[in-house]
Image (tube, rainbow, N blue to C red):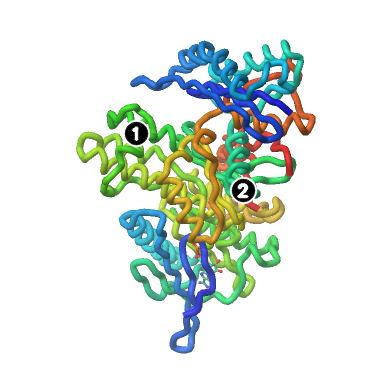
Amino acid sequence: MKLIAKGAEACIYSLSAFGKEFVLKRRERKDYRVPELDLRLRAERTRSEARTMLRLHAIGVRVPGLIALGKFSICMEKLEGMLLKDTQKTGGIFTEVGKALALMHDNGTVHGDLTPANVMICNSLPYLIDFGLSSFTNGAEDKAMDLLLMKRAVSSRLYKSLEEAYLTNSRTGKEVILRLADVEKRGRYQNRNLE
Amino acid sequence: MLVLGLESSAHTFGAGISDGGKILANEKAMYKIGATGMIPAEVAETHVENAEGVISAALEKAGILPSDLEGICYTAGPGMGPCLQVAQIAARALASKLKIRIVGVNHCVAHAEITREMGRLSDPIMLYVSGGNSQILALSERPFRHYSVIGETFDIGVGNMLDNFARAANLFPAWGSSVEKASAGGRYLELPYTVKGMDFSFTGLLTRATELTGKVPVNDLSYSVQETAFSELCEATERAILLKGKKEIGVCGGVAQNSRLRQMLQSMASEQGIRFGFAPNEYNADNGGMIAFAGERLLSEGISWKLGECRISQRYRVDSAYVPGG
Ligand SMILES: Nc1ncnc2c1ncn2[C@@H]1O[C@H](COP(=O)(O)OP(=O)(O)O)[C@@H](O)[C@H]1O
Ligand SMILES: [Mg+2]
């Protein structure tokens, strides 16, 4: 097992078995919090990430395939590619992200942490990853937050491609975009720039 | 430059004196919070009674006369309107009498800047935790130098949550520090935990903890409330550190006085291999010294307000205030 990435919550290892490459995402212990809370959060998020991956896979949203599930770890397919944040960003890619998001939201699933660091580009197609903060809800506010995070992180031209595809493909897209305007007006996000 | 700073945004009236970034005096008088919480007009009245004495004490401590002052600053917000007015009116009266320059200071910027100075931090992720506010801040140079908000509470500040819980649990005084004392020897009970990216929420936690008062031991409950709330803050801060690629963490504001919160942030910083810094407690509580410190920097850059334009703003956003230096 080789460590390939270390995020805020998890360590990502690559491993090979049966001549194939896999990724193991393990949520690590945080010494700053009490063990009871630490165990609960790591288990909850691992479970919720796996559940969302399965559900999205079933409805045809591109995600890494789930291979095996442990209490704090998920073994999944390894995507050969780069993070959206580190690649040449094109309108075409953002159109695909918009379509995927529409499908996912119409299904009642929100990502919870949708940034260019949580999208991987593989054979020129976007795959969504990192579902630890995802939830099953049809709330317009939660859906709007998914859009807002992306909007704050990329150029307005790229975001436009995403939003157009989202509106065309989502049944509830219009309501979500209206709510997004509302959220932005509230001020707390007015000057927020996550670059 | 000898500068007097006045603070009265909440329960404290403070007067501080700074000179070349050194704090020569930091005097204060606090409104005693009762079972009913804070009634702004009543607090403001107490500030009016205390103002003169506190200002005189600061001048005496610094060993200067009013006529030695070269500038005056006051907290322009955020805070409670009637309270903010007290420092504003006192500052304007002094500025006009002494014929010296005056400028309004953002309260959050003052907390963050004094902490950057005293905690020896240069470009940190700053966790600002007070009664009414809880935000994750980072310096940003564009379009002007300011603290941008990277994450914040969806609802109430962590300080207000602790105060409200203290009141519900009949802790005395009904104050966040009583929750810290009551948590000694507690055991962890499961409570609602809400973090979304770099934002967090405390109302679900407060509601559940309030329901449980009287049904479980108060030290278990106090302990669990603290652990849950502070873990939320640490998680969001850690995410901000990684997203922004910063190498330092600071904590400021009233709740920064809590030693458990500092211990948790220190543990997280060590894990990340980065520096953690904070100011002495007298600067984490509301105080005039930090207002003098931040105001002196503004005045040194030639920034001051006309007497007739000295405003206050209850909702003065931290990200709309210019931060001097750079
Ligand atoms: N299935 C995968 N295939 C290849 N790389 C992956 C895969 N999943 C995650 N990674 C890599 O690991 C990094 C962190 O994964 P992520 O799930 O986003 O965890 P975190 O919660 O720590 O951000 C990603 O940015 C990516 O580089
Ligand atoms: Mg990630």
Q: Is residue A45 left or right of residue B55?
A: left
Of callouts 1 and 2, the N-terminal one: 2
User: Could you tell me which chain the residue with mark 1 belongs to?
Assistant: B
In front of the other: A105 or A1: A1
Which amino acid does the dot numbered 1 rest on? Ser
Q: Residue furthest right?
A: B302
Question: Which residue is denoted by mark 1 in the rendering?
Answer: B178
Circle 2 packing at 10 Å, graded few (<14), some (14-19), many (20+), is many
Q: Is residue B48 left or right of residue B64?
A: left
Query: x and y percent of residue B295 in the render?
Result: 68, 29
User: Can residue B204 be seen?
Assistant: yes
Query: x and y percent of residue B256 in the render?
Result: 48, 40
Residue plotted at (66% across, 54% down): A154
Which amino acid does the dot numbered 2 rest on? Leu
* Residue at disc 1, secondary structure: helix
Question: Which residue is denoted by mark 2 in the rendering?
Answer: B121
In front of the other: B161 or B324: B324
Q: Is residue B178 above or below residue B120?
A: above
Query: x and y percent of residue B276 in the render?
Result: 54, 51
Residue plotted at (53% across, 64% down): A128
Residue B290 location, quadrant: top right
In front of the other: B303 or A13: B303
* Residue at disc 2, secondary structure: loop
User: Could you tell me which chain the residue with mark 2 belongs to?
Assistant: B
Residue B292 location, quadrant: top right
Residue plotted at (56% across, 58% down): B274
